[in-house]
Amino acid sequence: MSPAIVVAMILSTAALLAAGYLFGARSGRSARDSLRGELEQRESSDSIAESELADARRDLAQAREIAARSEAEAKAARAQIESSQHDQQRWREELAAAVEPLVLREQQASESMRAELGKLASTLQAQSSEGARLSQQIEAKLRPLVAQKSSSKALKNELEELIAPLLQRERIGAALAQLDPAVAKGDLPQALTAIAEKAGFGTVVLSDDVGLPIAVNDGGKEPDVHAGLSSLLVTLCDRIEGNEQPAPIAAVLRDEANQVVIHRIFRTRKQRYVLTAVSNGAAVPPDVLDPALNTVERILGRQRW
């Protein structure tokens, strides 16, 4: 075998070995790059999963906090209803106690009058010549009784007028406290519509503290106007609080059209809101909207505005 052939064989073998090495090195680098990409993708997926898990835990904690607060507010609402029912019963008892002496006095006067009339009738039968004079005496005796009945009726009307706002508050408070739980799972317009229907309000508006309307009930009128007026009320309350006085949280206004407008200021999630309701002439106290705040706050806590 000639030296040239030997050299050629050696060169061929060396080239074959070099080619195999280069191919193996290239394949190994490609495999390393692929493994590195899979590792980075897995780390990215794990990071996203951890972030989503943290968000889910935070949402769960917020949901538990809202549920606990809602339960506490529901207990407070039930306690308020029970207290209101107790106050209503006490008013009824006081009214009955005030009216009972009047009725008893009227009965006694009637019995006394009947006795006197019986005596006068006997005298009339015995002395027919004095009939005209006895008739005048009977008329004079009857006149105070008629006046007393009129006075009792006026007193009854006055008492009914005094307790009318309390009865109206109890009626509306009981209606708002019995809102369907499904209302709190809906949106704000549905909740405001339910409040208006239950309490008999024409318009119910929710606005923020700068006077921007957030939601209004179906059929509500002039939400922008009521929201603007509520912002003026918030400004006035801030000034009162700035003078080291307790800040008002509710106000009742009556306009020239005999409409009663109730404004209720409340705070949730570090933001102030105003719930405004318009009643057609019915006298209502400032706290009439309090039972509805629980439902509105739950919706605001669930949604972002």
Image: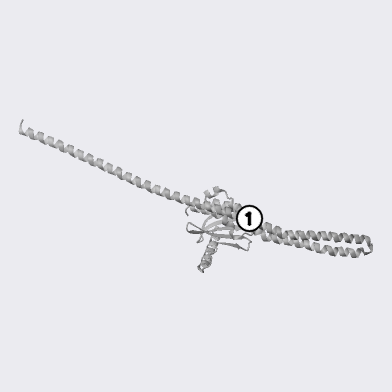
Residue farthest left in this picture? 2
Question: Is residue 81 shown left or right of residue 15?
Answer: right
Q: In the picture, which quadrant includes the N terminus?
A: top left
Whether residue 112 is visible, yes or no, is yes
Query: x%, y% of residue 111?
Result: 82, 59
Residue farthest top in this picture? 1
Picture layout, residue 23 above or below residue 127: above
Task: Report the front residue among 37 and 137.
Answer: 137
Question: Is residue 4 shown left or right of residue 222?
Answer: left
Task: Report the front residue among 8 and 193.
Answer: 193
Q: Secondary structure at mark 1?
A: helix
Question: Is residue 235 shown left or right of residue 104?
Answer: left
Task: Report the front residue among 101 and 39.
Answer: 101
The three-letter amino acid code for the residue at tag 1 is His
Dot 1 corresponds to which residue?
86
Whether residue 219 is visible, yes or no, is no
The residue sitting at 37% across, 46% down in the picture is: 49
Q: Quadrant of residue 85?
A: bottom right
Q: How many numbered circles are shown?
A: 1
The residue sitting at 68% across, 59% down in the picture is: 94
Query: x%, y% of residue 20?
Result: 18, 37
The residue sitting at 15% across, 36% down in the picture is: 17
Query: x%, y% of residue 209?
Result: 50, 61
